[in-house]
Image (cartoon, helix red, strand yellow):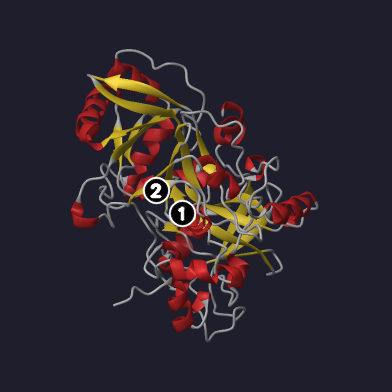
């Protein structure tokens, strides 16, 4: 039996939106890891006030890209600057379509002169591999899926642990018997722990100091136990799947935007290459903001804050479209990325029937309205952040409403999708919100780029 493709799914459903629209879809959380260890509130507090340990070993796809054309294929299909990309460095890899819409992003680490590791959700990996195979680049690929899709229940190839928070460096010094070599942000350094060799990537989440340690899976259990032992007297807290999903709301990273691949006739072959039961065919759309046109969900790298990542000093797919988008960004025609701080009283009223609603997480696209009820933006990720005392929403909003302090409202509800008018009055409640900068965390907003 032939495996159905993404294009097969679109044809059967009638449109990309009809395929993807799933009202009330459960938000994604990392697989395998415990949902909570000591409670999501305490786990969030750990990276704000103490030190946290996160296990990232199971939920990401890893793809090794090697060969004489490895740099060329990545540069031809990504906006990044490869002239300044050192071995041991990592970058947010940003591939776009010929129309300048983001496919998705991923973390790209350069492991050798002609060797890279691309990690994250697999949409960017699919994009690179397809174009490499189609055009005959001299490059090879090895993929390790996430634990939910790894055949036979086998272990990952790599462990990946983060130590984050104000006391992160104290735990690192304790575990390794001293400080690690000084390392620039998003650069890595080789380390050993009792003869076990791996790498330490200088990395922070939600603006806090820390490292991400990456190495062979066979060393994973030993390294994890060593970190727990070193962190115990310092109050280290393990972070579960619920709290893990929330730092991006503070750090300004918008995960898993809708790939801009569903409508271009020239990408029909690509859609036939992609399996229906993959990320591109199964990541749901939901929320109070509904459009029958999937292109209304596409985003530009400029809207996501990747403008400084785009390097026009080389030719790449989508370059001309991004030059035009750059002018639109200067002319205030593109949406701005902001953080909405939801009114805590309204959160309790709407989400908790007057009580504390507990943990809130949503990747739904909710309408954001002005005081006059006009659509001015759309939410991209929403989560409770207990140290802030309310719910935050990463949002793309019209420039005229993007100034900090602007009052807006979030329409909370699930549009049923096709068969109901996009602008139908469905009686959904409104949650008042105030526009604030993105990243919301001041350190992430002011230091990430300077330290990189």
Which quadrant of the figure contains the N terminus?
Answer: bottom left
Q: Quadrant of residue 212?
A: top left
Check the image and report above or below for 23 versus 232: below
Q: Residue furthest top?
A: 178
Can see residue 145? yes
Task: Name the one closer to the observer, 146 or 164.
Answer: 146
Q: Secondary structure at mark 1?
A: helix
Q: Residue at x 26, y 45 (%)?
A: 156
- Dot 2 falls on a residue whose secondary structure is strand
Tell me, for residue 129, which label it has, or none.
1
Q: Are marks 2 and 1 in contact (CB under 8 Å)?
A: yes
Q: CA distance from mark 2 to mark 1?
A: 7 Å
Residue 309 rendering spot, x and y as whole percentages:
63, 41
Q: Is residue 43 left or right of residue 349?
A: left
Which residue is found at the position 57% from the left and 42% from the top? Answer: 440
Few, some or many residues within 10 Å of mark 2 (<14, 14–19, 20+): some
The residue pinned by badge 2 equals 141
State the mark number for residue 67.
Answer: none
| Earlier sequence position, callout 2 versus callout 1 | 1
Return the residue nearer the eye: 271 or 322: 271
Q: Position of residue 179 (x, y in %)?
A: 38, 15
């Amino acid at each position: 039996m032939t495996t159905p493709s993404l294009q097969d799914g679109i044809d059967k459903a009638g449109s990309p939106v009809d395929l993807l629209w799933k009202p009330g879809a459960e938000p994604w959380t990392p697989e395998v890891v415990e949902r909570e260890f000591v409670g999501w509130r305490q786990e969030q507090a750990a990276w704000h006030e103490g030190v946290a340990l996160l296990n990232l070993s199971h939920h990401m796809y890893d793809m090794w890209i090697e060969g004489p054309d490895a740099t060329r294929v990545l540069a031809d299909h990504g906006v990044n600057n490869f002239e300044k990309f050192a071995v041991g460095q990592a970058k947010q890899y940003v591939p776009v379509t010929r129309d300048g819409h983001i496919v998705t992003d991923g973390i790209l680490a350069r492991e050798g002169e002609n060797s890279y590791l691309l990690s994250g959700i697999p949409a960017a990996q699919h994009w690179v591999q397809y174009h490499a195979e189609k055009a005959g680049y001299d490059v090879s690929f090895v993929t390790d899926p996430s634990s939910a899709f790894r055949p036979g229940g086998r272990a990952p190839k790599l462990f990946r642990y983060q130590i984050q928070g104000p006391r992160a460096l104290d735990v690192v010094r304790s575990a390794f018997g001293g400080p690690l070599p000084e390392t620039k942000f998003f650069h890595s350094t080789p380390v050993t722990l009792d003869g076990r060799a791996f790498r330490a990537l200088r990395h922070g989440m939600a603006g806090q100091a820390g490292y991400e340690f990456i190495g062979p899976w066979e060393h994973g259990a030993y390294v994890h136990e060593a970190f727990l032992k070193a962190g115990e007297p310092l109050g280290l807290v393990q972070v579960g799947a619920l709290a893990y999903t929330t730092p991006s709301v503070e750090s300004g990273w918008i995960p898993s935007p809708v790939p801009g691949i569903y409508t271009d006739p020239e990408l029909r072959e690509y859609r036939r290459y992609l399996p229906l039961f993959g990320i591109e065919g199964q990541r749901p759309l939901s929320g109070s903001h509904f459009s029958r046109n999937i292109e209304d969900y596409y985003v530009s790298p400029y809207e996501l804050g990747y403008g400084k990542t785009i390097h026009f000093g080389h030719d790449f797919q989508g370059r001309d479209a991004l030059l035009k988008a750059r002018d639109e960004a200067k002319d205030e025609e593109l949406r701005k990325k902001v953080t909405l701080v939801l009114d805590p009283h309204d959160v309790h009223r709407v989400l908790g029937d007057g009580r504390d609603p507990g943990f809130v997480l949503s990747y739904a696209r909710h309408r954001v309205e002005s005081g006059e009820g006009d659509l001015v933006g759309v939410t991209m990720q929403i989560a409770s952040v207990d140290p802030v005392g309310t719910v935050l929403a990463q949002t793309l909003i019209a420039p005229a409403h993007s100034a900090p302090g602007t009052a807006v409202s979030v329409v909370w509800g699930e549009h049923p999708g096709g068969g109901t008018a996009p602008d139908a009055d469905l009686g959904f409640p409104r949650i008042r919100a105030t526009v604030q900068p993105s990243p919301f965390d001041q350190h992430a907003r002011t230091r990430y780029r300077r330290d990189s």
